[in-house]
Protein backbone atom coordinates (compact mmCIF):
# COMPACT_ATOMS: atom_id res chain seq x y z
CA UNK A 1 0.00 0.00 0.00
CA UNK A 2 1.28 3.45 -0.95
CA UNK A 3 1.07 5.99 1.89
CA UNK A 4 2.02 9.66 2.13
CA UNK A 5 5.32 8.74 3.74
CA UNK A 6 6.22 6.08 1.15
CA UNK A 7 5.25 7.98 -1.98
CA UNK A 8 8.17 8.77 -4.26
CA UNK A 9 8.88 12.36 -5.20
CA UNK A 10 8.08 12.43 -8.92
CA UNK A 11 10.85 14.95 -9.54
CA UNK A 12 13.57 12.40 -8.80
CA UNK A 13 12.51 10.51 -11.94
CA UNK A 14 14.29 11.27 -15.18
CA UNK A 15 12.21 11.67 -18.31
CA UNK A 16 12.77 8.11 -19.53
CA UNK A 17 11.65 6.64 -16.20
CA UNK A 18 8.64 8.94 -16.12
CA UNK A 19 7.71 7.84 -19.63
CA UNK A 20 7.99 4.17 -18.63
CA UNK A 21 5.56 4.76 -15.76
CA UNK A 22 3.00 6.36 -18.06
CA UNK A 23 3.21 3.59 -20.67
CA UNK A 24 3.05 0.88 -17.98
CA UNK A 25 -0.08 2.52 -16.60
CA UNK A 26 -1.82 2.64 -19.96
CA UNK A 27 -1.28 6.34 -20.61
CA UNK A 28 -0.17 8.02 -23.83
CA UNK A 29 3.44 9.07 -24.28
CA UNK A 30 2.53 12.74 -24.70
CA UNK A 31 1.08 12.76 -21.17
CA UNK A 32 4.55 12.16 -19.77
CA UNK A 33 5.81 15.13 -21.79
CA UNK A 34 3.00 17.27 -20.40
CA UNK A 35 3.84 16.35 -16.81
CA UNK A 36 7.56 16.90 -17.41
CA UNK A 37 6.74 20.36 -18.73
CA UNK A 38 4.62 21.15 -15.68
CA UNK A 39 7.43 20.08 -13.38
CA UNK A 40 10.45 21.67 -15.04
CA UNK A 41 9.19 24.56 -17.19
CA UNK A 42 6.29 25.76 -15.06
CA UNK A 43 7.59 24.71 -11.65
CA UNK A 44 4.32 23.08 -10.53
CA UNK A 45 4.16 22.04 -6.88
CA UNK A 46 0.88 20.10 -7.08
CA UNK A 47 -0.83 17.78 -9.52
CA UNK A 48 -4.01 19.87 -9.27
CA UNK A 49 -2.19 22.63 -11.18
CA UNK A 50 -1.81 20.33 -14.20
CA UNK A 51 -5.10 21.38 -15.76
CA UNK A 52 -4.49 19.83 -19.19
CA UNK A 53 -4.54 16.37 -17.59
CA UNK A 54 -7.75 14.50 -16.88
CA UNK A 55 -9.02 14.40 -13.32
CA UNK A 56 -8.53 10.63 -13.31
CA UNK A 57 -4.88 10.95 -14.31
CA UNK A 58 -4.26 13.69 -11.76
CA UNK A 59 -5.82 11.46 -9.11
CA UNK A 60 -3.64 8.53 -10.18
CA UNK A 61 -0.54 10.70 -9.93
CA UNK A 62 -1.64 12.00 -6.55
CA UNK A 63 -2.10 8.44 -5.29
CA UNK A 64 1.37 7.39 -6.44
CA UNK A 65 3.69 10.37 -6.15
CA UNK A 66 4.40 13.55 -4.20
CA UNK A 67 6.05 16.81 -5.20
CA UNK A 68 8.30 17.87 -2.34
CA UNK A 69 8.40 21.55 -3.21
CA UNK A 70 10.00 24.16 -0.98
CA UNK A 71 7.78 26.71 0.77
CA UNK A 72 8.46 30.39 1.36
CA UNK A 73 8.74 30.85 5.14
CA UNK A 74 10.14 34.34 5.75
CA UNK A 75 11.13 37.29 3.55
CA UNK A 76 13.41 40.13 4.63
CA UNK A 77 14.05 43.23 2.55
CA UNK A 78 17.19 45.31 2.87
CA UNK A 79 17.38 49.07 2.51
CA UNK A 80 19.63 48.52 -0.53
CA UNK A 81 17.03 46.36 -2.34
CA UNK A 82 18.50 42.98 -1.46
CA UNK A 83 15.87 40.38 -0.53
CA UNK A 84 16.62 37.35 1.64
CA UNK A 85 14.11 34.50 1.66
CA UNK A 86 14.04 31.61 4.07
CA UNK A 87 12.47 28.49 2.62
CA UNK A 88 11.08 25.53 4.54
CA UNK A 89 11.84 22.10 3.11
CA UNK A 90 9.48 19.12 3.16
CA UNK A 91 11.31 17.60 6.14
CA UNK A 92 11.12 20.77 8.22
CA UNK A 93 14.65 22.06 7.65
CA UNK A 94 15.34 25.59 6.41
CA UNK A 95 17.59 27.14 3.77
CA UNK A 96 18.10 30.69 2.57
CA UNK A 97 18.37 32.33 -0.85
CA UNK A 98 19.28 35.92 -1.61
CA UNK A 99 18.16 38.14 -4.48
CA UNK A 100 20.76 40.78 -5.31
CA UNK A 101 19.32 43.42 -7.66
CA UNK A 102 21.28 45.93 -9.69
CA UNK A 103 18.17 47.49 -11.20
CA UNK A 104 19.98 50.28 -13.09
CA UNK A 105 21.83 47.60 -15.08
CA UNK A 106 18.75 45.35 -15.29
CA UNK A 107 20.82 42.67 -13.61
CA UNK A 108 19.27 40.43 -10.99
CA UNK A 109 21.27 37.67 -9.34
CA UNK A 110 20.01 34.91 -7.08
CA UNK A 111 22.39 33.31 -4.61
CA UNK A 112 21.16 29.75 -4.01
CA UNK A 113 21.96 27.18 -1.35
CA UNK A 114 23.02 23.60 -2.08
CA UNK A 115 23.11 22.08 1.42
CA UNK A 116 21.33 22.43 4.74
CA UNK A 117 24.25 23.74 6.76
CA UNK A 118 27.88 23.11 5.79
CA UNK A 119 30.67 20.79 6.91
CA UNK A 120 33.69 22.91 5.96
CA UNK A 121 33.77 25.16 9.07
CA UNK A 122 35.40 28.19 7.46
CA UNK A 123 36.20 30.48 10.40
CA UNK A 124 34.62 33.63 8.96
CA UNK A 125 31.34 32.12 7.76
CA UNK A 126 28.11 31.85 9.76
CA UNK A 127 26.92 28.83 7.76
CA UNK A 128 30.21 27.11 8.59
CA UNK A 129 29.25 27.20 12.26
CA UNK A 130 26.25 25.00 11.48
CA UNK A 131 26.70 21.28 11.03
CA UNK A 132 25.83 19.82 7.63
CA UNK A 133 22.45 18.18 7.92
CA UNK A 134 21.97 17.02 4.34
CA UNK A 135 22.42 17.89 0.70
CA UNK A 136 19.55 19.49 -1.15
CA UNK A 137 18.20 17.54 -4.08
CA UNK A 138 18.22 18.99 -7.58
CA UNK A 139 14.56 20.00 -7.41
CA UNK A 140 15.05 21.94 -4.16
CA UNK A 141 17.82 23.97 -5.78
CA UNK A 142 15.74 24.44 -8.92
CA UNK A 143 12.80 25.63 -6.78
CA UNK A 144 14.90 28.44 -5.30
CA UNK A 145 15.54 29.79 -8.80
CA UNK A 146 11.89 29.54 -9.85
CA UNK A 147 10.55 31.14 -6.69
CA UNK A 148 13.09 33.95 -6.53
CA UNK A 149 12.52 34.62 -10.23
CA UNK A 150 8.82 35.08 -9.44
CA UNK A 151 9.80 37.41 -6.62
CA UNK A 152 12.01 39.37 -9.01
CA UNK A 153 9.22 39.72 -11.57
CA UNK A 154 6.74 40.86 -8.93
CA UNK A 155 9.15 43.37 -7.36
CA UNK A 156 11.06 44.73 -10.35
CA UNK A 157 9.06 43.63 -13.40
CA UNK A 158 12.11 41.87 -14.83
CA UNK A 159 13.44 38.28 -14.66
CA UNK A 160 16.56 36.91 -13.04
CA UNK A 161 19.66 37.29 -15.16
CA UNK A 162 22.25 35.36 -13.13
CA UNK A 163 22.51 32.45 -10.71
CA UNK A 164 25.35 31.93 -8.25
CA UNK A 165 25.76 28.81 -6.15
CA UNK A 166 27.19 30.75 -3.23
CA UNK A 167 24.54 30.28 -0.54
CA UNK A 168 24.53 27.75 2.26
CA UNK A 169 26.75 24.72 1.73
CA UNK A 170 29.63 23.56 -0.46
CA UNK A 171 28.25 22.88 -3.95
CA UNK A 172 30.92 20.36 -4.93
CA UNK A 173 29.97 18.20 -1.95
CA UNK A 174 26.44 18.12 -3.38
CA UNK A 175 27.79 17.43 -6.85
CA UNK A 176 24.98 15.28 -8.29
CA UNK A 177 22.25 17.62 -7.05
CA UNK A 178 24.03 20.76 -8.25
CA UNK A 179 24.66 19.42 -11.74
CA UNK A 180 21.16 17.98 -11.87
CA UNK A 181 19.64 21.35 -10.99
CA UNK A 182 21.76 23.12 -13.59
CA UNK A 183 20.64 20.61 -16.21
CA UNK A 184 16.99 21.52 -15.53
CA UNK A 185 17.72 25.23 -15.34
CA UNK A 186 19.58 25.28 -18.66
CA UNK A 187 17.63 22.68 -20.63
CA UNK A 188 15.21 23.82 -23.37
CA UNK A 189 12.79 21.46 -21.62
CA UNK A 190 13.40 23.33 -18.39
CA UNK A 191 14.05 27.03 -17.80
CA UNK A 192 16.29 27.45 -20.85
CA UNK A 193 18.83 29.69 -19.12
CA UNK A 194 22.34 30.05 -20.53
CA UNK A 195 25.00 28.21 -18.49
CA UNK A 196 27.24 31.25 -18.99
CA UNK A 197 24.93 33.08 -16.59
CA UNK A 198 25.56 30.50 -13.88
CA UNK A 199 28.52 30.45 -11.48
CA UNK A 200 29.30 27.64 -9.05
CA UNK A 201 31.46 28.62 -6.10
CA UNK A 202 33.68 26.18 -4.21
CA UNK A 203 36.04 26.42 -1.26
CA UNK A 204 38.46 24.42 -3.38
CA UNK A 205 37.96 20.65 -3.60
CA UNK A 206 40.57 19.77 -6.19
CA UNK A 207 39.38 16.33 -7.29
CA UNK A 208 35.85 17.63 -7.83
CA UNK A 209 37.11 20.60 -9.86
CA UNK A 210 38.85 18.09 -12.13
CA UNK A 211 35.61 16.12 -12.32
CA UNK A 212 33.82 19.27 -13.48
CA UNK A 213 36.35 19.52 -16.28
CA UNK A 214 35.96 15.85 -17.19
CA UNK A 215 32.19 16.30 -17.23
CA UNK A 216 32.66 19.22 -19.64
CA UNK A 217 30.49 21.65 -17.71
CA UNK A 218 29.69 24.95 -19.40
CA UNK A 219 29.10 27.19 -16.39
CA UNK A 220 31.58 29.49 -14.66
CA UNK A 221 33.65 28.55 -11.62
CA UNK A 222 34.42 30.71 -8.59
CA UNK A 223 36.98 29.84 -5.94
CA UNK A 224 36.49 31.07 -2.39
CA UNK A 225 40.18 31.83 -1.96
CA UNK A 226 40.46 34.45 0.81
CA UNK A 227 44.19 33.92 1.37
CA UNK A 228 47.09 33.51 -1.03
CA UNK A 229 49.45 31.44 1.12
CA UNK A 230 48.87 28.09 2.79
CA UNK A 231 49.61 29.22 6.34
CA UNK A 232 46.89 31.85 6.34
CA UNK A 233 44.45 29.78 4.33
CA UNK A 234 44.87 26.81 6.71
CA UNK A 235 44.03 29.15 9.58
CA UNK A 236 40.69 30.28 8.18
CA UNK A 237 39.72 27.41 5.85
CA UNK A 238 40.39 23.87 7.16
CA UNK A 239 39.68 22.46 3.67
CA UNK A 240 43.07 23.84 2.61
CA UNK A 241 44.87 21.26 4.74
CA UNK A 242 43.75 18.53 2.31
CA UNK A 243 43.60 20.79 -0.76
CA UNK A 244 46.55 23.15 -0.48
CA UNK A 245 47.17 25.92 -2.96
CA UNK A 246 49.57 23.87 -5.10
CA UNK A 247 46.99 21.09 -5.47
CA UNK A 248 44.19 23.61 -6.02
CA UNK A 249 46.10 25.49 -8.72
CA UNK A 250 46.88 22.25 -10.53
CA UNK A 251 43.15 21.46 -10.61
CA UNK A 252 42.26 24.95 -11.81
CA UNK A 253 44.80 24.79 -14.63
CA UNK A 254 43.24 21.45 -15.66
CA UNK A 255 39.75 22.98 -15.51
CA UNK A 256 40.77 26.03 -17.52
CA UNK A 257 42.53 24.05 -20.24
CA UNK A 258 39.72 21.54 -20.62
CA UNK A 259 36.69 23.81 -20.46
CA UNK A 260 37.88 27.35 -21.35
CA UNK A 261 35.24 28.51 -18.85
CA UNK A 262 35.65 31.65 -16.78
CA UNK A 263 37.33 31.34 -13.38
CA UNK A 264 37.11 33.93 -10.64
CA UNK A 265 38.58 34.23 -7.16
CA UNK A 266 36.39 35.42 -4.30
CA UNK A 267 38.65 37.21 -1.82
CA UNK A 268 37.24 38.59 1.43
CA UNK A 269 39.65 41.05 3.01
CA UNK A 270 40.21 40.98 6.77
CA UNK A 271 41.89 43.88 8.53
CA UNK A 272 45.62 43.23 9.04
CA UNK A 273 45.30 39.54 8.14
CA UNK A 274 45.18 39.12 4.36
CA UNK A 275 44.98 42.70 3.07
CA UNK A 276 48.64 43.80 2.91
CA UNK A 277 50.59 44.49 -0.27
CA UNK A 278 52.58 41.32 0.44
CA UNK A 279 49.28 39.41 0.35
CA UNK A 280 48.44 41.16 -2.91
CA UNK A 281 51.82 40.12 -4.35
CA UNK A 282 51.18 36.49 -3.35
CA UNK A 283 47.74 36.68 -4.91
CA UNK A 284 49.21 37.98 -8.16
CA UNK A 285 51.31 34.82 -8.42
CA UNK A 286 48.10 32.75 -8.44
CA UNK A 287 46.82 34.61 -11.49
CA UNK A 288 49.53 33.70 -14.00
CA UNK A 289 48.48 30.30 -15.32
CA UNK A 290 44.99 31.08 -16.64
CA UNK A 291 42.72 34.11 -17.07
CA UNK A 292 41.12 35.01 -13.76
CA UNK A 293 38.90 37.74 -12.36
CA UNK A 294 39.38 38.67 -8.69
CA UNK A 295 36.35 39.83 -6.73
CA UNK A 296 37.47 41.62 -3.58
CA UNK A 297 34.67 41.43 -1.03
CA UNK A 298 34.11 43.48 2.11
CA UNK A 299 33.96 41.33 5.23
CA UNK A 300 30.60 41.08 6.95
CA UNK A 301 31.14 40.47 10.68
CA UNK A 302 29.43 37.50 12.34
CA UNK A 303 29.11 36.48 15.96
CA UNK A 304 31.94 34.52 17.53
CA UNK A 305 34.88 35.71 15.41
CA UNK A 306 37.64 38.26 15.93
CA UNK A 307 37.98 39.19 12.27
CA UNK A 308 37.36 42.79 11.32
CA UNK A 309 36.47 44.45 8.04
CA UNK A 310 39.45 45.96 6.22
CA UNK A 311 39.68 49.73 6.17
CA UNK A 312 38.57 51.25 2.88
CA UNK A 313 42.05 52.62 2.09
CA UNK A 314 43.62 49.17 2.60
CA UNK A 315 41.10 47.62 0.18
CA UNK A 316 41.79 50.38 -2.34
CA UNK A 317 45.57 49.95 -2.06
CA UNK A 318 45.23 46.18 -2.34
CA UNK A 319 43.08 46.48 -5.46
CA UNK A 320 45.40 49.07 -7.03
CA UNK A 321 48.40 46.76 -6.60
CA UNK A 322 46.61 43.97 -8.43
CA UNK A 323 45.39 46.25 -11.21
CA UNK A 324 48.89 47.65 -11.69
CA UNK A 325 50.07 44.04 -12.11
CA UNK A 326 47.55 43.54 -14.91
CA UNK A 327 45.02 41.52 -12.90
CA UNK A 328 41.28 41.99 -13.52
CA UNK A 329 39.73 43.20 -10.27
CA UNK A 330 36.28 44.15 -9.03
CA UNK A 331 35.66 45.49 -5.54
CA UNK A 332 32.27 44.35 -4.33
CA UNK A 333 30.68 46.40 -1.62
CA UNK A 334 28.48 44.34 0.65
CA UNK A 335 24.76 44.12 -0.01
CA UNK A 336 22.04 43.15 2.45
CA UNK A 337 24.13 43.53 5.62
CA UNK A 338 21.18 44.92 7.56
CA UNK A 339 19.25 41.65 7.10
CA UNK A 340 22.23 39.26 7.47
CA UNK A 341 22.04 38.48 3.74
CA UNK A 342 25.59 39.42 2.82
CA UNK A 343 28.40 37.02 1.96
CA UNK A 344 29.09 34.62 4.83
CA UNK A 345 26.10 35.65 6.92
CA UNK A 346 23.51 33.02 6.00
CA UNK A 347 22.72 30.99 9.10
CA UNK A 348 18.94 30.72 9.50
CA UNK A 349 18.79 32.94 12.56
CA UNK A 350 15.04 33.28 12.06
Image (cartoon, rainbow, N blue to C red):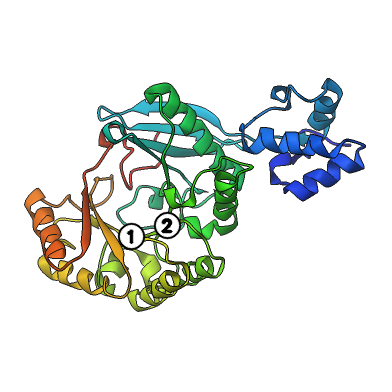
Do the residues under discs 2 and 1 have CB atoms within 8 angstroms? yes
Mark number displayed over residue 220: 2
Tell me: residue 152, above or below residue 342. above
Q: Secondary structure at mark 1?
A: strand
State left or right for residue 300 relative to residue 88.
Answer: left
> Measuring 13% from the left and 54% from the top, which residue is drawn there?
315
Residue 204, percent from left and from top:
40, 65
Residue 238 appears in which quarter of the rendering? bottom left
State left or right for residue 144 relative to residue 282.
Answer: right
> Measuring 17% from the left and 68% from the top, which residue is drawn there?
279
Tell me: residue 119, above or below residue 167. below
Q: Is residue 7 visible?
A: no
> Measuring 33% from the left and 51% from the top, which residue is drawn there?
125
> Measuring 27% from the left and 38% from the top, which residue is drawn there?
335
Mark number displayed over residue 250: none
Residue 174, percent from left and from top:
54, 56
Residue tagged 1: 264
Q: Residues within 10 Å of mark 1 (few under 14, many from 20)?
A: many
* Labels in figure, total: 2
* Quadrant location of the N terminus in the rendered image: top right
Residue 311, percent from left and from top:
10, 50
Q: Secondary structure at mark 2?
A: strand
Amino acid sequence: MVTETTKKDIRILDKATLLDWFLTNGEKKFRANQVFEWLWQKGAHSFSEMTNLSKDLRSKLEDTFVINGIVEDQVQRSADGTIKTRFRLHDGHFIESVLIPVAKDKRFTVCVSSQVGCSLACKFCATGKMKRIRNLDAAEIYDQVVMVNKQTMETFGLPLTNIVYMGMGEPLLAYKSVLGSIAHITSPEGLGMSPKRITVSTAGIAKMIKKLADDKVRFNLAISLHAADDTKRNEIMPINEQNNLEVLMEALIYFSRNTKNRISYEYITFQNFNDSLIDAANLTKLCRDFPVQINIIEYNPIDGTTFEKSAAHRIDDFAKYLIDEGVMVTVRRSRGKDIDAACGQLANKG
